[in-house]
Image (cartoon, rainbow, N blue to C red):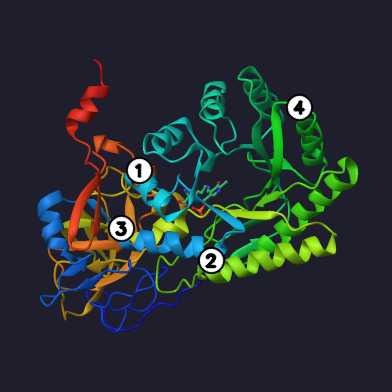
Amino acid sequence: MSRSAHPAGPRHADVLPEGHYTAPADDLNALDPKVWAHTVGRDADGVVTVGGIAVTQLAEEYGTPAYILDEADFRDRARAWRTAFGTDADVFYAGKAFLSRAVVRWLDEEGLNLDVCSGGELATALSAGMPAERIAFHGNNKSPEEIERAVRAGVGRIVLDSFQEIVRVAHAAESLGKRQRVQIRVTVGVEAHTHEFIATAHEDQKFGIPLADGQAAEAVRRALQLDGLDVIGIHSHIGSQIFDMSGFEVAAHRVVGLLKDVRDEHGVELAEIDLGGGLGIAYTSDDDPREPHEIAKALSEIVTRECEGARLRTPRISVEPGRAIVGPTAFTLYEVGTVKPLEGLRTYVSVDGGMSDNIRTALYDAEYSVALASRTSDAEPMLVRVVGKHCESGDIVVKDAFLPGDLAPGDLIAVPATGAYCRSMASNYNHATRPPVVAVRDGAARVIVRRETEEDLLRLDVG
Ligand code: LLP
């Protein structure tokens, strides 16, 4: 994404260094609803509030850093996806984005299904009472033990990712006297990320069975012959943080092409197609994600058109949004520890977390925004880099952003849109203890994942 440098008066730098930043907002105290959870605002004292609770109170009660999750917003977004896709389609929330037992209950109550991709996620889902038939089990190397657990539990579908797995799942099902519903995950030769869309050699990856060289057709051929398997459809997932629907268009075209080949060869019309997740969210004000109803309309039109062209019955569609549901619902609350101006460069703001609670900036060069949360300020904007407390110079949370020039140790700052792939990818680097997830709703806060303690760390270290 190309960004323009901003010429207007940040402290500590007459000429701004190279970087990817937009001009500071006219009002640094404003909270762009695009990147903040629905109930976020400021109270009369200028303190950021969520679900009616001030972040100063949350910090006092639960400490920092902490992920603060707006439960009402989560439910709203889950419901919006559910409603947009209606009763002729299924929405599977991708648990890898963030999963906890509370989240599973919310999903269950809001009528969503759940995609899990490991024994741990499956255990969480089942222990919170998600009906097994509403669970899809993913993964490119599920262990025999995970497969057996999933089949035994009666998951609604296992997404097969290799020829070995076709045999393993069939075998597990037959030994348990069951017939397992499965989809076959194919790679359609499309990979889409953020603003790019490339349709070349993207079969070069570990997921799925390639379509182009006939392997996917062979996988269907083999799976259809096995008594333990009920082949319900084809699965495709093309990437992450996608705004452009054209990648889905190409994917649907190719998947429908396979459905047609299967019909012609076997006389079987597979009943379902899953188009995966990957729908983008706004991390900064520059991002413009689509609404669920626009996405639902676009996908259903694409699939219907393709099927009409191939004279196929339109299959039931399913999707697997993770980030688009949970991403915008949470922010990370940090306390500022040090403020270090570097003349002619930028000001380094160190917070009490870092790459252990948000690895995305270091790993993907991800962009985030940030706001002063414990008060407002009319000070001139200064260009900052928000960094963590880890022993690594790449320990960056927000690469380039503007905060008020009077920022000081003890201030609370909040980084929005950290609901997805932050807690779920958190680590104990430098023996950091992973932050809690605090859910806020209607003036009440509760911990849904507690803060790790040093005792927790020591408990694993058996000497
Ligand atoms: N379905 C499948 C088969 C997937 O592999 C994924 C994500 C999803 C659904 C959900 O995608 P979402 O709607 O959340 O974008 N750690 C990376 C993202 C990796 C996504 C892996 N698969 C990140 O932080 O951006």
Rendered view: 370 above or below 150: below
Q: Does label 2 or label 4 sit earlier along the sequence?
A: 2
Q: Residue at x 16, y 68 (%)?
A: 407
Q: Quadrant of residue 171?
A: top right
- The disc at residue 84 is 2
Q: Is residue 24 left or right of residue 94?
A: left
Quickly name the residue at label 4.
226
Q: CA distance from mark 1 to mark 4?
A: 35 Å
- The disc at residue 100 is 1
Mark 3 vs mark 2: in front? 2
* Amino acid at the residue labelled 2: Ala
Quickly name the residue at label 3.
71
Mark 2, residues whose alpha carbon is within 10 Å: few (<14), some, or many (≥20)? some
The image position of residue 363, as x and y in percent, is: 44, 49
Q: Does label 3 or label 4 sit earlier along the sequence?
A: 3
Disc 3, SS: helix
